[in-house]
Image (cartoon, grey):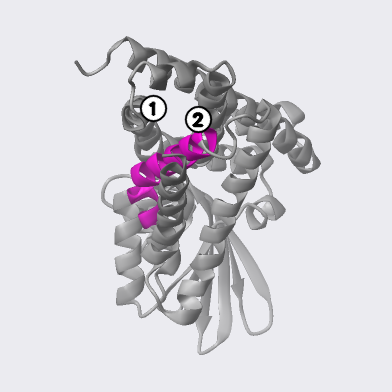
Amino acid sequence: MMFDRLDRYIARNVLGAMLVVQTMVLGLDLVISYINDLGDVSGDYSALDVLVYLLMRLPWRFYEYAPVGVLIGSLIGLGTMASSNELTVMRAAGRSLGRILLGVLKPLVLVILVTMAIGEYVSPVTEQHAAAWRLEQSKGADAVLSRGGGWQREGNDFYRFGTIRADDTVINVRRYVFDDQELTQASEAERAVWNGDAWQLENVATTFFDDDATRVERHASETWETALTPAQLNRLLRPLDSQPLTSLWKYASYLRTQGQEATQPLLYFWQKSLLPVTLAGLVLLAASFVFGPLRTVAAGTRIFYGVIVGLTFKYLQDLLAPASVLFGFSPAVAVIVPTATCYLLGFWLLRRTG
């Protein structure tokens, strides 16, 4: 039997706690982010638009906070059962510690599947749409420069892009043309639309820098002659932490062919690839705390320790990422070391409890 009655009871308690924690964390983050982003309100970008933008980003935030929800949720779910002596009764009835842990890990499969699906198929789309929508609502040159984007060189042309939507429409394209280090023309287009074979620029204003004067030409539409493809611009303009695995690997390969460091895309690639192993390690660590040093403490203390462990885990990964560039080791190590630490600490604490 895959799930017996005790397995279902454990799963219900742990999953319920994870859901509550994830909801509370997302709600708190939404409120804090909303207050912080109210400073961006100007012109057509209203306070309601700020809220809509943050709601669009909820899938990405769900994915980012999944490890926190799993860790603290496991601590609370198992801790509640430990406080009411339910775990003690289970063990007295012949339920082994390993069997209880297996009952905790079984529902984690559902959490992993949902989280991975959101990270691979949902958040990349919603992040693109949110960034493009915010840029279009904000409008203006200052909005473009403050919302990220990216630069790209093609021959003597330099491009500055705002962002790219999920339908491969590039928002705000700036082009600077040089002739022997002298700027000869600068243009700005409201957007570039991919029609399947080529790019079409819309609402284009081009400034020509002649020897004795400047002149401006405006066109409602014109063809953009470039070798850049939507796939290349997607990898360039989309935030690395919201790109799917395949895009991260291709972007890393592209950087390598250009002789550039590929540490950042590879770091996110390994973080996403090893997410199931990481979540299982955090659950194991939470269980080891409940069966070990946090067996008899209050729920608030468990939450405190869960937050400390979660922050330590995140900061360790964040510190190892630049260290991989400095010392030349693989970005995979920056992900594997914190995860392995969780497993080693978890097994050590469980071994001490017998």
Name which of mark 1 and mark 2 comes first in the sequence.
2
Q: Is residue 102 left or right of residue 38?
A: left
- Which residue in the protein does label 1 denote? 104
| Outermost residue to the left | 1
In the picture, the quarter occupied by the N terminus is top left
* SS for dot 2: helix
Picture layout, residue 325 above or below residue 279: below
Closest to the observer, 205 or 72: 72
Q: Position of residue 252 (x, y in %)?
A: 34, 65
Q: Quadrant of residue 121?
A: top left
Q: Are marks 1 and 2 in contact (CB under 8 Å)?
A: yes
State whether residue 57 is above or below residue 7.
below
Measuring from the top left, give residue 75's x and y in whole percent: 55, 31
Describe residue 39's horizontal placement relative to residue 124 as left or right: right
Whole-Å distance between the Cαs marked 1 and 2?
Answer: 8 Å
User: Is residue 289 part of the magenta span, yes or no?
Assistant: yes
Asked if one can make out residue 45 in the rendered structure from this viewpoint, the answer is no
Q: Is residue 35 left or right of residue 72?
A: right
Q: Which residues are magenta?
A: 269-291
Which residue is depicted at the point 51% across and 73% down? 323
**As rendered, which of 330 and 231 lies closer to the eye?**
330
Residue on which the image places disc 2: 74
Circle 2 residues within 10 Å: few <14, some 14–19, many ≥20: many
Quadrant where the image shows the C terminus: top left
Q: Could you tell me the amino acid type at mark 1?
A: Val
Where in the figure is residue 344, as x and y percent of width and height? 42, 53
Q: Residue at x 64, y 41 (%)?
A: 305
Amino acid on which disc 2 is placed = Ser
